[in-house]
Amino acid sequence: MAKTVVQEFTKGLWAEIPPFRLVLGLCPTLAVTKTVENGVGMGIATTFVLVCSNILISLLRNVIPKNVRIACFIVVIATFVIVVELVMQAFAYPLFLKLGIFIPLIVVNCIVLGRAEAFAAKNGVVSSFADGLGIGIGFTLSLTALSIFREVLGSGTFTVPITSVSIPLFGPSFQPFNFLIEAPGAFVCLGLMLCIMNMLGKK
Amino acid sequence: MGDYILLAVSCIFVNNILLIQYLGNCPFLGVSKKMETATGMAMAVVFVLVLAGTITWIVDHMLLKTFGVEYLRTLAFILVIASLVQFVELFLKKSIPALYAGLGIFLPLITTNCAVMGVCLINIKEEYSFLQAIIASLSYAIGFGLALILFAGVRERILLARVPKPLQDTSIGLVGAGMMSLAFFAFKGMV
């Protein structure tokens, strides 16, 4: 199964895009997609952890003994999550506050551990880097799409990433569809988006 | 006493860890297709979550706060949870083999369950006392189990319905979960 590096990268963008095709990483998907800024921020944080841990685990793959590998992967991933946590606290504090406990929860994000176990432990550094980057960016795209949908319809605003500027999109007579912002709406939204992806995939 | 009951009720229903706080979704969709697997997973989670919540609270207050290394919390907690799961597995294998056989593969899977790590972190964030942390962990676990078992029942019924092809399996499962979440939302007016 010798794919080129570019193929490893692009498969994360459609064929194995989490959380739709690769059904992993659902917890943060549902929780952080309330505003576009949160979704994009979470996606970037997860991508960083994914790429770094994939690279390091791939470099160490011949050194880590088989029976303690999960524990080792978790230590590597947790370390990078701490790095992300501290960087966010220093440079993006409002975002850090909004994402709350979901930043440390990147360490149990099934995507990160899943790719480490399934790919980085068995492949070279460049492929692992491409895989991590592709899947991370795919995840960020999914989060962005879902959060645009939920925020625009759910509260009638659009929060521009990084600047935290919340732009109201519709006039004052717009009644926001609050259902989408709350928990039930998240589940239904994800389910329907998955359905749309399935329909597009069948074509 | 009343405070603790209120805490328990709010963790089981009002702030249900799965349906309201979105934690623990991966196994939720993975094991809820059959009632037996859902019950097994629920039992395993209750077992691990109470122990994990208690031990991580102790670790946080005795070690992390004493040495001022709160930034290592993520690493410390996940190591505690992973080792705890390993230890519980070995312990059950030796002492209660029937329970171990019943739980099967779900025990190691709980290590990456967002709900376990999430509850441990929530206990710290809400600054619960030791007794509150134990009660919260137990209640969150019961809430998780409850949601899981109810959802398994719903999913078994969905299998009998005629669902359009693109909606099948996970999609309709998620929509169903959304409806359940909506039902649990009604509890918000209770407290």
Image (cartoon, coloured by chain):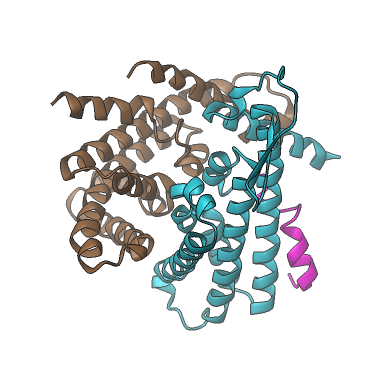
* Residue occupying the point 27% across, 50% down: B52
- Judge by depth and name the residue closer to the eye, B127 or A1: B127
* Residue occupying the point 33% across, 46% down: B125
- Judge by depth and name the residue closer to the eye, A74 or A182: A182
Q: Is residue A52 left or right of residue B107?
A: right
Image coordinates of residue A157 in percent, x first then y, are: 68, 33
- Is A2 magenta? The answer is yes
* Residue sitting farthest toward the bottom: A63
Q: Main secondary structure of the magenta part?
A: loop
Q: Is residue B156 left or right of residue A39?
A: left
- Is A36 magenta? The answer is no
Vertical arrangement, residue A174 with respect to residue B129, above or below: above
* Residue sitting farthest toward the left: B1
- Judge by depth and name the residue closer to the eye, B121 or B165: B121
Task: Name the image quarter holding residue B137.
Answer: top left
* Residue occupying the point 56% across, 56% down: A111
Looking at the rendered image, the quarter that the C terminus of chain A falls into is top right
User: Magenta stretch?
Assistant: A1-23
Vertical arrangement, residue A173 with respect to residue B126, above or below: above
User: Can residue B190 be seen at all in this image of the molecule?
Assistant: yes
Image coordinates of residue B9 in percent, x first then y, are: 28, 25
* Residue sitting farthest toward the right: A203
What is the count of numbered marks? Answer: 0
- The tint chain B carries is brown
Task: Name the image quarter holding residue A36.
Answer: top right
Q: Is residue A83 left or right of residue A34?
A: left
Image coordinates of residue A25 in percent, x first then y, are: 56, 49
- The tint chain A carries is cyan
- Judge by depth and name the residue closer to the eye, B49 or A43: A43
* Residue occupying the point 32% across, 36% down: B140
Image coordinates of residue B174 in percent, x first then y, are: 58, 31
Vertical arrangement, residue A170 with respect to residue A148, above or below: above
